[in-house]
Image: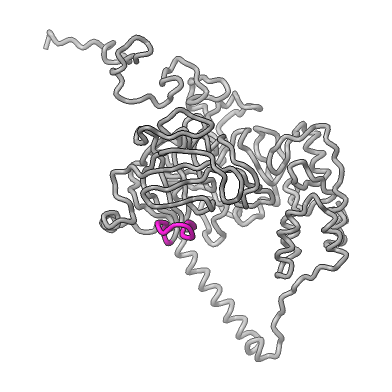
Amino acid sequence: MEECKIVIEDIYEIPTDGAEGGDGEGREKMPDCRYCKDNPRRKCKHCACVACGEKDEPDKQILCDECDDAYHLWCLKPPLEEIPDEEEWYCPRCKNDESEVIKAGEKLRHSKKKAKMASKQRESTRDWGRGMACVGRTRVCTIVPQNHFGAVPGVPVGSMWKFRMQASEAGIHRPHVSGIHGRDGEGAYSIVLAGGYEDDQDDGEVFTYTGSGGRDLSGNKRTAEQSCDQTLTKMNRALARNCAMPLNPKGATAKNWKDGKPVRVLRSWKGRKHSKFAPQDGVRYDGLYKIVKYWPQKGKSGFLVWRYQLRRDDTAPAPWTKEGTAISKKLGLVLQYPDGYLESLEEKKKNQGKKRKHEETEDGGSSSQTGTPAKKKVIYKLETSDRALIKADTTNQKLWRELLAVEKKDGFLDRVQETFCCICCQELVFQPVTTTCNHNVCKSCLQRSFRAKVFNCPACRGDLNQKMSLAVNQELSRTLLSLFPGYEAGR
């Protein structure tokens, strides 16, 4: 034992790669960051603070919940004194609060109207009867970091959840709505097949995925028809980086596709209209896939889209196969519901039953027994003068066409009010200004934004010319005054 000497320097010695004079075979594991090679003394804006590149004090860094970029608290403008208590935090580039105009990097101000929304009427526990469109996470996966490639420990292939929010909490696919999760400088970590693009083709073990972008989502729409070409930027570029080939703006095909970075793939029940491999309900984790090739192509809409061919590369059998079904049954993998969800549905059914019974027995019988006529649906019919005003508003013809398609249905005026709602004050636009990106905002709200030196569209955060003329769209103003007479009173 006396002759056995342990040299501390040898234990902690970092093997050098071939670029620095080594033989290139010392490192068994590839570095997490391909830019700085995990060198703690080298500045890197890809794996450290994107503002300064320093790697010091990681406990004082905050991650954006959309793009996963890290920032030091003091590198933000204005700087933060401490990490906010909010469930989600967005960096200045990703922040897009649709309820008010704010400065980039500024904390969201309290909104009385937003506080009255159903999704905000909750404390630490969820009320599943209020819907799942905008509910926040109650827990975050800490088993793996947000920029983790590959499988998540403890989440087997075939796991199913009722809502995507649960998959986000499990760490499989973190974004609530976006179909691609990744960083354009690193790659994509996970995607969701939800049948949102007509160009998607799903054959199970192999499928062709369509990139994101090229759609006009103004008016609070979650999806829309393709209206312009897609570009190889942001999440499209992130997904392309998973291919085992250098990034190519014209597309590329991997020589050995298995050398690429893995992508976690989830399939949603919404994809049933295109694929027989989608689940009957909820979302399902189908394992790891890798990019075989990616290329631009004119889609069915007539616009350019980016397409990606992915092939399955997972040791676990696919959930739709006999082997996969047997393993899922053995592990007891069934559709997971959130805590309290089924109980909330039962309570809601009971309350509806009691309400219906109360209405039938009130005043000694039902409405038919008492002779009270049933309420008729109010069908709105446009006057000829209103149609002429709508036709004159050429700037918003696309929105009016969508509204006129449901003119004879109940709630036409409510749809108009929702479409032309100012996202700053959450009221029907007054003295509307139509921006160059075709969004309608109150003139006073836009003036307030410009006085605060914020020259961005409140809806899409697109750049606006600070010298732009804030001329009122008189055609839209006259149309709204005709449909909602007197709404301008007090404004």
User: Residue at the spot x=40%, y=34% of the render?
Assistant: 254
**Does 23 appear above or below 432?**
above
**Which x, y percent locates residue 415?**
72, 61
Q: What is the magenta range?
A: 270-280
Residue 474 lies in the magenta-colored region: no
Which residue appears at 54% of the width and 45% of the height? 178
How many labels sit on residues?
0
Q: Is residue 485 left or right of residue 104?
A: right
Residue closer to the observer: 465 or 413:
465
**Image point (46%, 65%), residue name:** 343
Q: Main secondary structure of the magenta part?
A: loop
In front of the other: 8 or 207: 207
User: What residue lies at 44% left-to-right and 49% top-to-bottom?
Assistant: 167
Examine the image and state in which quarter residue 278 appears. bottom left
Judge left or right: residue 86 versus residue 24.
right
Q: Quadrant of residue 7?
A: top left
What percent of the width, then of the height, locates residue 308?
47, 42
Q: Is residue 186 left or right of residue 116?
A: left
Say which quadrant the N terminus sits in: top left
Q: Is residue 62 in view from this perspective?
A: no
On the image, the x and y values in percent for residue 243 come to: 43, 34
The answer to whether residue 346 is visible is: yes
Q: Is residue 75 above or below residue 239?
A: above
Q: Nearer the viewer, residue 186 or 112?
A: 186
Q: Is residue 55 above or below residue 313?
A: above
